[in-house]
Image (cartoon, rainbow, N blue to C red):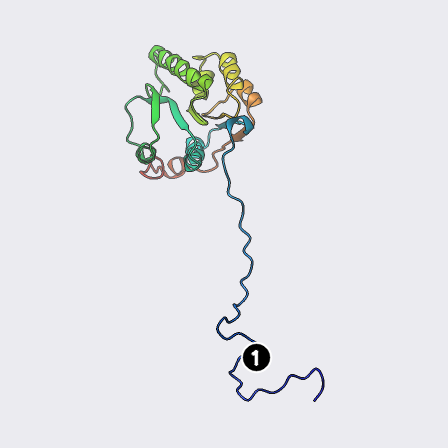
Amino acid sequence: MAEHDSPSRTDPMAPPEGANSAAPRRAPVPKRKKPGPYRVPPREQRHGLLIVNTGDGKGKTTAALGLLLRAVGRSMRVGMFQFMKAAGITEGGEYAALKRLGVEIVPLGAGCALGVADTADDQTLANAGWNHCSVLLAAGEYDVLVLDELTLPLAYGWLDTTSVVDALRARPIGTHVVVTGRHAPPALIEAADLVTDMRVIKHPYREQGVRAQAGIDV
């Protein structure tokens, strides 16, 4: 028999000579590379962003809601204030969904002002709403603050753009702010860290006359 040959075994099912049958060898388990868990760093270690969703396309508020949902999942303090939505209008699906998550959307306006001759009430509400939000912003009440349709009071001249942009720039370190709406003024775009311009290419209402649908639009 050659030196490298193993001695033959009479029972082929028996363990090799010297093996401990009471403690059989385990099959190797492939290594699993697990990504490190994402965590929300302390405020002083975060790069707070000013995010602007503008343009004439659909999805500006929807995108902000998606970001808000992600932040809620990370147990961040979030808030959403809507400048052009009528107070008391809470039938939209997003209101019900966020209420279940313990997040409140606060309407601050009087509804759509397009085609309305007298906008004095809208201007008053916009100023009162901004005064309220600016206090919360300066106090660092939220990790993520969504100011929905804030661009319209700026574009209409109801709010002073310079004052608003200065307040947004001076927000507490680590605070993320999302501003949505059409006609974002150049000063706001210049101050922002992330700007998305949503263009309308096709719209079911424009091309097909399909009105807003529950679960999709409201």
Looking at the image, is 204 positioned above or below residue 152? below
Q: Quadrant of the N terminus?
A: bottom right
Q: Quadrant of the C terminus?
A: top left
Question: Which residue lies at the image location 54% right of the left edge and 26% below the top edge?
Answer: 44
Residue 185, percent across and down?
52, 19
Residue closest to the eye, 36 or 133: 36
Residue closest to the eye, 200 or 85: 85
Q: Which residue is mark 1?
A: 16
Q: Is residue 47 visible?
A: no
Labels in figure, total: 1
Residue 87 sits in quarter: top left
Residue 151, percent across and down?
46, 21
Question: Which residue lies at the image location 55% right of the left edge and 75% below the top edge?
Answer: 19
Residue 31 sits in quarter: bottom right
Mark 1 surroundings: few (<14), some (14-19) or many (≥20) residues within 10 A: few
Residue closest to the eye, 180 or 5: 5
**What secondary structure is marked by label 1?**
loop
Q: Is residue 138 left or right of residue 1?
A: left
Residue 116, percent across and down?
34, 16
Q: Is residue 151 visible?
A: yes
Can you name the residue that lies furthest to the right here? 2
Which amino acid type is shown beneath numbered disc 1? Answer: Pro
Residue 183, percent across and down?
48, 22
Looking at the image, is 29 positioned above or below residue 165? below
Q: Is residue 97 left or right of residue 54?
A: left
